[in-house]
Amino acid sequence: MTITIYHNPACGTSRNTLAMIRQSGVEPDIIEYLKSPPGRDRLVELIAAMDIPVRDLLRQKGTPYNDLDLGSDRWTDDQLIDFMVEHPILMNRPVVVSDKGTVLCRPSEKVLELLDDVGTFTKEDGEAVTGNR
């Protein structure tokens, strides 16, 4: 199985997701999207593959979301995508791409939809997650 994670190592949810992928026995391709952001075309592909509204991929906390007034209805989906290209921190994470689909893994347990066997996993905050077994 091939898995790619758009990852931010400073994010606990992203770290937990990466650890669950590794616990399933897969070493994913890791793209630190703040260092190597997806281009506009790739971002459009990811949104389509996740079958989510563009706004669902926008991150508000710790970003210029409020300064740019991105909560306003005046922005089109194309404009919101342009903002994410210009400011990659606006892209919510982690996004995981696998043979089984593409998922925004918030919460991190959403990655279980894409994995064969994780067993029991303990998140950084001590919460136990039971995966497929």
Image (spheres, rainbow, N blue to C red):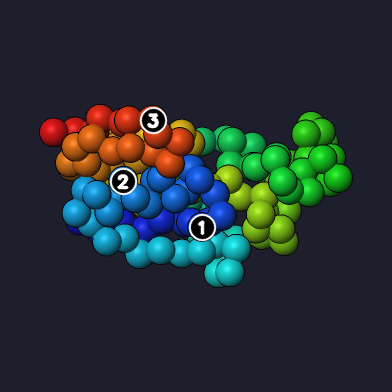
CA gap, disc 1 to disc 2?
14 Å
- Circle 2: residue type: Met
Question: Going 23% across and 56% down the picture, which residue do you hit?
Answer: 26
The number of numbered badges drawn on the structure is 3
| Of 12 and 48, the residue lying toward us | 12
The residue where tag 3 is placed is: 127
| Of 37 and 41, the residue lying toward us | 37
Q: How far from the left and from the top, in percent, is residue 65?
A: 77, 43
Chain-order first, disc 3 or disc 1: 1
Q: Quadrant of residue 37?
A: bottom right
In this view of the protein, can residue 54 be seen by the observer?
no
Chain-order first, disc 2 or disc 3: 2
The residue where tag 1 is placed is: 9
For label 2, the SS is helix
* Neighbours of disc 1 within 10 Å: few (<14), some (14-19), many (20+): some
For label 3, the SS is loop
The residue where tag 2 is placed is: 20
Q: Nearer the viewer, mark 2 or mark 3?
A: 3
